[in-house]
């Protein structure tokens, strides 16, 4: 009989490494003493860092739990099953059922599939071989015990985690910018400086996350994983996903947000996404690296880039709980992306062809000057052309719209100066008045909050009645569902009303940021970022109505696109509509 064995440890700590060595040595000796032929030409160790290495006749998963859905991430385990199907051995030895799997479903399915191939699994802890049909029920029973032990252990761990969270402990690995000491986060000043640098690059230099990652790599700035106890120090490449996590994480403002998910079945890897009111949030000034205003500005800028360069696509994924309850996770991605965010030159993602609405392409031209048989290559000023025309010609866009960069700069400067001299004190209040009805908003919020509290009181009373057995299980479930449906409805209505205030606050904040950028515009040091703070788009169109192909420029401002007359007209229009209604 040709035999192999499988070993697994759930962490990559030194003592667990010793456990692997002990398991390997034990089974090597076991196979020798029982005259089994050791498998050859197969075997693999899969490490937590993602690397794989060939072994001679046995399989090891390092630093992985036996849950994870349940074998999806155990690469060595999966390779072992694949080799079993290829007929490389007829027996698999495992120290215990829990090493093999902590899920009854997985255990039964895998040993059944292997049995059909003539491959048996021998569990050393219970001294049973799956190839023997009489052992099937007992193996199922022991697998159930292992699964329940795993569940109870998970519950105990979760209880400890929740206590730690409530005491301001951080329960996962430290995010970039912090060290974790005795369970508590502390600012790592070197990493904190990098976080501030990332915010500076994103907000003030207008760089995207991929370009930021590239620059940090070029500057040889260490990542969080550049140092490890096992491998010492080694520079690693920054990845754009790391930058994305940093700019999205509110922890850098001192806002520690935990308990957003809960694993409801440790053995099947089922995750429940907790409602927002179950999040545990601590506001800790000792952890602040970024001020609130910078964080808000970055989130606004990020949203604007998403909206400008693509459309939002909400992908809903449903995960089913063990009790049949389903939970939804909504992921937002950008679709229909025709261009990427760029700050490569002054008018990147700002200057567009008004005919095909595609970004203008920056070009450099040269001139050969010949004098006294000497040839000299002269560089001429930069100019812009329609990218569509430049690639496809008149088949896609009829106008080249060629424009000299210095002429565009001068024209934009003049428009900005004109904008600075316009009285805008009327603008924001009238804009809010046109777009939002706040006449009864406060009273509506108070009413909904009162009804919500009343429903919560009813729910508490119902639970007490059930505890005292004053109502039946059926009555309790029926009434409880009605109350929860009402609470859900009131919550949606309340969120809708409160959202109006949030939108108004955000509109005001964007307006004041815009006005500050407009009034303090530095005409001597114009950058792509300083233009994007006040301008959404600059468009050029060619007007040949008089046969002369006149080039016309238009600016779409981030605010103040309506003049005072237009604002007054819309305000009066709204008044008459409400009066007639």
Image: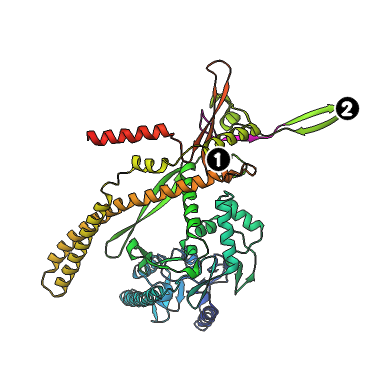
Q: Mark 1: give few (<14), some (14-19) or many (20+) Cα within 10 Å.
A: many
Q: Position of residue 435 (x, y in %)?
A: 34, 41
Q: Position of residue 316 (x, y in %)?
A: 36, 52
Is-magenta flag for residue 144? Answer: no
Toward the bottom, the furthest residue is: 33
Q: Residue tagged by mark 2? A: 373
Give me the residue at 34% from left, 39% from top: 434
Q: Nearer the viewer, mark 2 or mark 1?
A: 1
Mark 2 and mark 1: Cα distance apart in space: 43 Å
Q: Residue tagged by mark 1? A: 349
| Magenta-highlighted residues | 348-365
Toward the right, the furthest residue is: 372
Give the total of numbered labels. Answer: 2
Q: Nearer the viewer, residue 160 or 508?
A: 508
Magenta-highlighted stretch: main secondary structure?
Answer: loop
Does dot 2 land on a helix, a strand or a loop? loop
Pick the quarter of the image with the C terminus: top left
Q: Image quadrant of residue 221?
A: bottom right
């Amino acid at each position: 009989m040709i035999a192999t064995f499988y070993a697994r440890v759930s962490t990559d700590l030194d003592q667990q490494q010793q456990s692997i060595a002990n398991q390997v040595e034990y089974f090597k000796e076991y196979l020798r003493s029982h005259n089994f032929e050791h498998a050859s030409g197969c075997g693999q160790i899969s490490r937590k860092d993602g690397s794989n290495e060939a072994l001679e006749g046995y399989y090891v998963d390092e630093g992985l739990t036996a849950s994870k859905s349940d074998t999806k991430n155990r690469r060595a385990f999966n390779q072992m099953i694949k080799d079993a199907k290829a007929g490389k051995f007829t027996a698999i030895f495992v120290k215990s059922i829990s090493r093999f799997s902590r899920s009854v479903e997985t255990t039964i399915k895998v040993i059944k599939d292997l049995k059909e191939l003539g491959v048996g699994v021998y569990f050393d802890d219970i001294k049973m071989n799956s190839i023997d049909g009489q052992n099937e029920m007992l193996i199922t029973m022991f697998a159930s015990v292992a699964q329940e032990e795993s569940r109870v252990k998970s519950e105990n761990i979760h209880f400890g985690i929740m206590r730690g969270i409530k005491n301001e402990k951080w329960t996962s690995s430290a995010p970039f910018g912090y060290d974790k000491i005795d369970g508590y986060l502390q600012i790592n000043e070197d990493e904190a400086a990098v976080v501030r640098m990332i915010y500076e690059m994103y907000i003030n230099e207008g760089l995207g996350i991929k370009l930021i990652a590239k620059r940090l790599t070029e500057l040889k700035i260490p990542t969080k994983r550049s140092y490890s106890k096992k491998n010492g120090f080694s520079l690693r490449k920054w990845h754009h996903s790391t930058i994305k996590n940093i700019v999205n994480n509110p922890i850098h403002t001192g806002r520690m947000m935990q308990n957003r998910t809960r694993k409801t079945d440790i053995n099947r890897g089922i995750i429940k996404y907790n409602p927002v009111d179950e999040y545990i949030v601590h506001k800790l000034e000792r952890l602040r690296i970024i001020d609130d205003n910078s964080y808000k500005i970055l989130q606004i800028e990020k949203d604007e880039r998403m909206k400008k360069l693509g459309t939002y696509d909400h992908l809903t994924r449903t995960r089913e709980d063990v009790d049949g309850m389903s939970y939804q996770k909504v992921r937002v991605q950008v679709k229909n992306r025709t261009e990427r965010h760029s700050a490569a030159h002054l008018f990147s993602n700002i200057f567009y062809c008004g005919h095909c609405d595609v970004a203008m392409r920056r070009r450099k031209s040269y001139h050969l000057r010949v004098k006294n048989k000497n040839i000299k290559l002269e560089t001429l000023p930069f100019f812009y052309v329609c990218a569509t025309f430049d690639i496809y010609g008149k088949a896609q866009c009829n106008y080249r719209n060629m424009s000299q960069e210095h002429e565009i700069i001068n024209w934009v400067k003049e428009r900005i100066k004109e904008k600075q001299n316009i009285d805008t004190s009327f603008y924001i209040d009238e804009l809010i008045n046109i777009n939002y009805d706040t006449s009864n908003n406060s009273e509506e919020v108070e009413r909904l909050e009162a009804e919500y509290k009343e429903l919560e009181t009813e729910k508490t009373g119902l639970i007490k009645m059930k505890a005292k057995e004053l109502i039946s299980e059926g009555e309790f479930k029926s009434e409880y569902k009605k109350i929860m449906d009402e609470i859900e409805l009131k919550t949606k209505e309340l969120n809708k009303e409160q959202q109006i205030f949030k939108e108004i606050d955000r509109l005001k904040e964007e307006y004041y940021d815009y006005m500050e950028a407009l009034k303090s515009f530095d005409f001597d040091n114009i950058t792509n970022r300083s233009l994007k703070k006040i301008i959404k788009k600059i468009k050029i169109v060619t007007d040949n109505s008089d046969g002369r192909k006149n080039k016309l420029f238009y600016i779409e401002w981030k605010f103040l696109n309506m003049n005072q007359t237009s604002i007054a007209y819309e305000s009066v229009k709204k008044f008459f509509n409400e009066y007639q209604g």
